[in-house]
Image (spheres, rainbow, N blue to C red):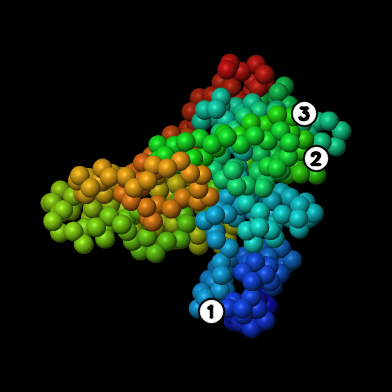
Amino acid sequence: MSPAVDAAELRRRTRALLAAHPPATTDRTDFLKARFDAGLAWVHYPVGLGGLDAPRSLQQAVDAELAAADAPDNDPRRIGIGLGMAAPTILGFGTDEQKRRFLRPLWVGEEVWCQLFSEPGAGSDLAALATRAVRDGDDWVVDGQKVWTSSAHAARWAILIARTDPDLPKHRGISYFICDMTDPGVDVRPLRQITGEAEFNEVFLSGVRIPDGHRLGPVGEGWKVAQTTLMNERVSIGGSRIPREGGMIGPVSQTWRDRPDLRTHDTHQRLLTLWVEAEVARLTGERLRQQLVAGQPGPEGSGMKLAFARLNQQISGLEVELLGDEGLLYGDWTMVRPELVDFTGRDAGYRYLRSKGNSIEGGTSEVLLNIVAERVLGLPAEPRNDKDVAWKDLSR
């Protein structure tokens, strides 16, 4: 942390950036690159990697100056996996060369990332994954299948975990890689969802060669690296910053105000309850982000993600019920492959259907309940008889 960089200094540097690269006349990508190079992308990152070694809490001083000047952002919803999951993992476990190569185009948005973790045969037990990576000289040859991969159809890079030693117990024989999604052997196929869209994908990996220089962390310690990704994923899903009545509670609250003809005593009571719970979740997320200033995200993010999924499903269900017959309408069932999810910009039917995935993506609610019970509340762990058994000897 640099003691010379305070809020006043960050505001001065931001104004200097705006003077040298006026947003109104500067190409958007050029402006974002200049911002990264000035250390104003994420100020808590190291100097030279988009930051200034400043406290994370000072980012808001930069963001306020840029917002006032109507400066472009990096479209964070489109590149959320890169920003929220890949970047902190690369920062924590990557080599200096990997950090220099990947962080700048990731933050600017020139390169989209996806996450190759879940597998169709592993269920909720991610550590049981079967995708294999076999060493061949300076490369690893990867074969397997991944599923529920958001943005794979738009991604240039992927964070990937694969089994490198089947003779070890399932948590200890995994390694972590960066996979080029344009390489031969990577086959991305759409998964059409209940919404009609194919936001998710399944990815088949057939003889994909990944250079050892694209491995993150030591061989066999991929589970440890993956925990950093997963904790950041849950924080990014459940703890994102939103204003009061932001997110799913906003549209249903507005419908209530605009349509007095739809109101009933029962829906009023349910809306009040959910409004309070949504506000509690929002403030809890704010507190969690403040805790991040002092260290790394912990299992508390699992609790936030749990609340996010439950509230989204309950709020969207209330919205459809409140609208009555209108809630059964659905705007467009065209099969498209979107690059981001837009809950609030769509109709109530979309929100209701899409929220069903919230309790699956980013870790199932059942798994997250175990994490909260064991790692937050300190309750006894569930009995597990497979922790010390070689992966190749597990029943499948």
Which quadrant would residue 357 be assigned to in this image? top left
Residue for badge 1: 69
Check disc 3 and report its element: helix, strand or loop: strand
Foreground mark, 3 or 1?
Answer: 1
* Mark count: 3
Q: Nearer the viewer, residue 10 or 251?
A: 251
Check disc 2 and report its element: helix, strand or loop: helix
Name the image quarter holding the N terminus.
bottom right
Which residue is depicted at the point 46% across and 61% down? 241
Name the image quarter holding the C terminus.
top right
- N-terminal label among 2 and 1: 1
Question: Against 360, is 102 above or below?
Answer: below
Question: Against 67, is 246 above or below?
Answer: above
Type of amino acid under label 1 = Ala
Residue for badge 2: 212
Q: Nearer the viewer, residue 35 or 169?
A: 35
Which quadrant would residue 263 be assigned to in this image? bottom left
Q: Is residue 383 left or right of residue 327?
A: right
Mark pair 3, 1: CA separation = 51 Å
Which quadrant would residue 206 be assigned to in this image? top right
Q: Is residue 8 left or right of residue 248?
A: right
Residue for badge 3: 134
Mark pair 2, 1: CA separation = 44 Å
Check disc 1 and report its element: helix, strand or loop: loop
Which residue is depicted at the point 13% across and 51% down? 264
Q: Is residue 370 left or right of residue 221?
A: left
